Image: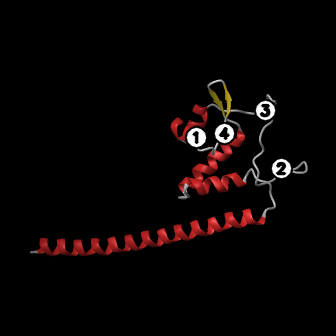
């Protein structure tokens, strides 16, 4: 909360004393996101998520769910974990830092350029496969016609 308002870039963290704050178990989080317990523990070991501990039980709050969602989205987009860490950590940083926003925008630009290049490479490979397929089919028809 900043000045009594929730920032659109910050994830509200429920008050630990608020009994109404929803929490999730590792099983619930893993099932929801379709990942293994090991994956979640790995992200925890890296400090990307920090669930509350109640004895040996991990208790996940909304902040953890949001961060896990961002981590998995970053992985799907091909970001390395250290870049994901930097970007996700910005959600917890105070807003208004131009350098932080410039950093994120730079990362987005780089990733977009990489994905566009991959798309162009895939399109070229599909086109080449199509040409090769056509040649193979023509040759096969010629062999069958004899």
Cα gap from disc 4 to disc 1, whole angstroms: 9 Å
Secondary structure at badge 3 equals loop
The crowd level at tag 1 (other Cα within 10 Å; few <14, some 14-19, many 20+) is few
The answer for how far apart the CA atoms under marks 4 and 3 are is 13 Å
Could you say which is closer to the camera, residue 138 or residue 102? 102
Vertical side of 107 occupied by 63: above or below: above
Residues under numbered marks 4 and 1 in contact, where contact means CB atoms less than 8 Å apart: no
**Residue 69: x %, y % from top left:** 63, 47
Residue 14 located left or right of residue 123: right
Mark 1 in CB contact with mark 3 (< 8 angstroms): no
* SS class, disc 2: loop
Foreground of the two, 114 or 28: 114
Which residue is under mark 2? 6
Mark 2 or 1, which is nearer the eye? 1
First-in-chain label (2 vs 1): 2
Question: Closer to us: mark 2 or mark 3?
Answer: 3
Q: Residue at x 67, y 41 (%)?
A: 64
Residue identifier under label 3:
16
Give neighbour class at mark 4: few <14, some 14-19, many 20+ (Cα, 10 Å). some
66 to the left or right of 75 = right
Q: How far apart are the two marked residues, 2 and 3, measured between alpha carbons? A: 18 Å
Q: CA distance from mark 4 to mark 2?
A: 21 Å
Q: Closer to the camera, 144 or 3?
A: 3
Residue at point 62% right, 65% down?
107
Disc 4 target residue: 50
Query: Mark 1 — residue?
Result: 45
Between disc 2 and disc 3, whose residue precedes? 2
Q: Residues within 10 Å of mark 3 (few under 14, many from 20)?
A: few
Report the residue at 79% width, 30% height from top.
Answer: 20
Q: Which residue is rendered at x = 54% and y = 56% of the image?
A: 80
Which comes before the other along the chain, label 1 or label 3?
A: 3
Check if mark 2's residue and mark 1's residue have beta carbons within 8 Å. no
């Amino acid at each position: 909360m900043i000045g009594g308002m929730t920032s659109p870039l910050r994830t509200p963290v429920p008050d630990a004393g608020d009994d109404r704050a929803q929490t999730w178990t590792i099983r619930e989080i893993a099932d929801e996101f379709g990942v293994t317990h090991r994956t979640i523990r790995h992200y925890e070991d890296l400090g990307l998520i920090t669930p509350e501990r109640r004895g040996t039980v991990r208790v996940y709050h909304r902040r953890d769910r949001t961060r896990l969602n961002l981590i998995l989205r970053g992985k799907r987009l091909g970001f390395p974990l250290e870049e994901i860490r930097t970007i996700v950590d910005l959600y917890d940083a105070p807003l208004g830092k131009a350098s932080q926003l410039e950093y994120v925008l730079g990362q987005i630009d780089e990733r977009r350029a990489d994905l566009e290049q991959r798309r162009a490479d895939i399109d070229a490979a599909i086109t080449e496969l199509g040409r090769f397929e056509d040649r193979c089919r023509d040759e096969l028809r010629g062999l069958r016609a004899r």
